Image (spheres, rainbow, N blue to C red):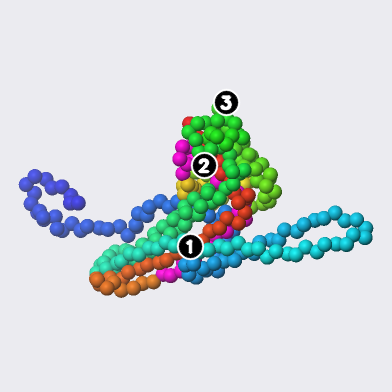
Amino acid sequence: MTIGATGGYVNLAQGNAFATIYSKDVQKFFRRAAVVQDITNTDYFGDIANMGDTVNIIKEPSITVSAYNRGLNLNTQELVDDQIQLTVDQASYFQFAVDDVEQKVAHHNWTELAIGSAAYALRDDYDSTVLTYMKGQAPSANISGSDSATATSDITSTSAGLDLGYDAGEISPLRLMARAARLLDDQNVPEDNRWFVAKPDFWEIMADENSKLLDHDWSGDTDSKLRNGRVTDGLIRGFRCYKSNNMPSASSATNLALWGHMSGTATASQIAKTEVIRSEMTFADKVRGLHLYGRKALRTEALGLSYYIVD
């Protein structure tokens, strides 16, 4: 853009003397927080190399306890070596090209910038896909509310969406979380390593003026830098709490929250290949990468979800 000239002023009239200046600061798009690595069993990362690889996970044997009387001949139980197979059946990739001329004259390292963007895109796709998978694994006993446009104040309902809020006849977020904790308790799920993930609208209501749970006076933390979508350093109703825009959507209810225990789902993920090759059609380098991963629900009783409505 040239600076305007007074009428009749013709010095350097073409404007070619004014240089176009490109900023070296690149505007990057906002990145969504990823939570899957924090809420799943990742012990099997690195055990995969190719599509179709299988990770065999040995199940803990169930031991039978019997009553004993003096002189009783004891029965010896045979241990069963059952296993669960986690199959690497998911793959995603990226590929882009940078022309030799663009590499030479560009004021930015476009290859480096694009690789950073690709790494985020792969992680974002992985996060969204695994969360959607986990939604489908929750047993009916661990589902509160339902995917319905009808709102209810009955926390035990499985036929309507839970009406979230603090007004009369509404269910507070804290009460919804207490119900989730109770359902896990019923399944004998350990209290440590429980997690709760919801979209921002849930945490907005949790932070309402009637709720002090996210206030630093409660958490004891005024300036810590939370990552991976963590809402607070503290636990709420025994859950580590996360905020995510990668949550699967509900059909009729406003949204849903996922909750459970870290042992509920296992994930295995690996960047299998990254490579730079010469383009066969142009003078350019092609950069591509392949991401392989698998996910398996190990203990469905340790997974649950709640449908809620915000009005």
Structural distance between the alpha carbons of marks 3 and 1: 48 Å
Q: Are marks 2 and 3 in contact (CB under 8 Å)?
A: no
Residue holding disc 3: 168
Q: Is residue 273 a member of the stretch shown in magenta?
A: yes
Q: Is residue 108 visible?
A: yes
Residue holding disc 1: 89
Residue holding disc 2: 256
**Front label number (3 vs 1):** 1
Identify the residue at image location x=53%, y=48%: 135
Q: Position of residue 78 (x, y in %)?
A: 75, 65
> Which circle marks residue 205 in the picture?
none
Q: Is residue 263 a member of the stretch shown in magenta?
A: yes
Identify the residue at image location x=49%, y=50%: 132
From the viewer's side, name the closer residue of 217 and 214. 214
Q: Is residue 120 visible?
A: no
Q: Position of residue 237 (x, y in %)?
A: 64, 43
Q: Which residues are magenta?
A: 249-274
